[in-house]
Image (cartoon, rainbow, N blue to C red):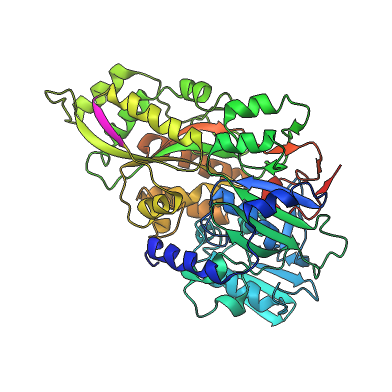
Amino acid sequence: MPDRRSAMKVIVGSVIAIPALLSEQAMAQAAPAAKTLRLVTPELTMLTSAFNTAGPIYQVSAKVFDGLVDYDFDFNMTPQLATSWDVSKDQRTITFNLRDGVKWHDGKPFTSSDVAWSAMNVWKVAHPRGRATFEDLTSVDTPNELMAVFKFSKPAPVSLMAFHSAESQILPRHLYEGTDLATNPRNVAPVGTGPFRFVGWERGSAVTLEKNPEYWDKSKPLVDRVVIRTIPDAAARSVAFEAQEVDLGGSMPVALSDARRLKDLPQFVIPDKGFEAFAAQAWIEFNVRRPELRDVRVRQAIAHALDKNFMVRAIWLGFGTVATGPISTALKQFYSKDVKTYAFNIEQANKLLDDAGYKRGANGIRFKITHDPLPIAEFYFRTGEYFKQALQKIGIDVELRTQDYATWIKRIYTDNDFDSQNATSYNLPDPSMGVKRYFWSKNIAKGVPFSNGSGYSNPAVDALLESAQVENDAAKRVEQFASFQRIVTEELPQITIADIQWFQLESRRVRGAANGPYGMHGNLAGVSFA
């Protein structure tokens, strides 16, 4: 993968040539229009999630790109770009029959060639989760322009959960083939097949999408324009909601204290559904390449120094529960409580550090580390601040570092220039999709965001994760994931803090934004106004 900072410079430069950008003034004038849906996100780095799994990007890209299928609340596949599908008895072949007459937003026909190219060159190679989900995908045959036949070397039950646009985005082959995937200008000016087509992006202000008049579902979309305001500060996003300048925000769009207040106002609602696909967790990850952090006793000591109950109460304000391991309690089938846990115990933490040979110096400091919170929301920064304070009590001096999002991604996943970091991630409907990527040694991949950034490698864990990926026996998969949880909670490349109650905030005039398990990460073609 190329240098991400250089890549972003190329991408940013490409935006200049794109017309029809929306100014703040124009956006304000458009706001009262009955057919303009106004969303809000943190700042964005690109507009396709085909190989970048940062949550805010989904909230834009899934409106521009449709997937092969959508999913209902029971995670049954429903038609989108594919009208039907067939799965072989051995679950090694999946045949998709594609919708006829679909066009890319530039007028070119959408065909099975686009599906095959994206699967083999993007999902399988560059997507942080797709690298695992489609590890055993050997080919995608295209008998004709409307048929894509996925062939796997081993059974692929998990892949059936992964064909949503938010997870496996199909890119236009004619605009990407032969280019550098990371720096292709269409990453910031996307051409998709979805209900809304890209108009312009004024960085630091807004992304503008308009109704796709050629959309395959002629009854949709139900709004004419989507304006996505990009507001980095959570408090400012709260102000925008209260001023009724925005209608909808996902992925915990406002400060949690404001969320509790706003949901009690008559003009807003936090739906009790629309996030089932996520199973979000908050965690702290260690770079186990570092000398001090390579010692498991040090990582366990840090775990004992953290009061998770306090963190859930004071940082997450009760929007979650204390986590015990890398699989969320939301995945009831796979969650196991039979794991090693670390009670808040400063005395035990100090003893483990002493036993590891890291004695306090004259100044009380054992050693120093850096810590990099994910720079997109206040709860990440609050976690970093608490982490620094907690470790000070056991003689570890923490240097908190802040940077923009693109720099953070490059630092963690390209340069591995960190000691510890905190973020959140999605377990998704199955651990093989959302959890495996962080612990599988074959997913230590330079430049791939939200992959195995810690550098953790354990052959036993690899074997369990790879076996669970292809196992058709449900009971065996449960035991494989139980064994996985026991090992990684002992070795702690990552300390899971909380199972998060993800949510979106809506104006009560919005209808249909939470009509599926992906909520704001869906295409919103069916959204209307009261």
In the figure, is residue 93 to the left or right of 488? right
> Is residue 229 placed above or below 100 in the rendered structure?
above
Instruction: Give the x, y percent position of residue 186.
Output: 57, 70
In the picture as drawn, the residue positioned furthest to the left comes out as: 362
The answer to which quarter of the image holds residue 223 is: bottom right
Q: Main secondary structure of the magenta part?
A: strand
Q: For the C terminus, which image quadrant? A: top right
In the figure, is residue 351 to the left or right of 494? left
Task: Tell me if I can see residue 225 in this picture.
Answer: yes
> Is residue 11 placed above or below 358 in the rendered structure?
below
User: What residue lies at 73% left-to-right and 69% top-to-bottom?
Assistant: 96
The answer to which quarter of the image holds residue 264 is: top right
User: What residue lies at 46% left-to-right and 37% top-to-bottom?
Assistant: 283
In the figure, is residue 209 to the left or right of 373? right
Span colored in magenta: 395-399
> Which is more toward the observer, 428 or 157?
428
In the picture as drawn, the residue positioned furthest to the bottom comes out as: 144
User: What residue lies at 66% left-to-right and 45% top-to-bottom?
Assistant: 277
> Is residue 355 placed above or below 130 in the rendered structure?
above
Instruction: Give the x, y percent position of residue 241.
Output: 68, 36
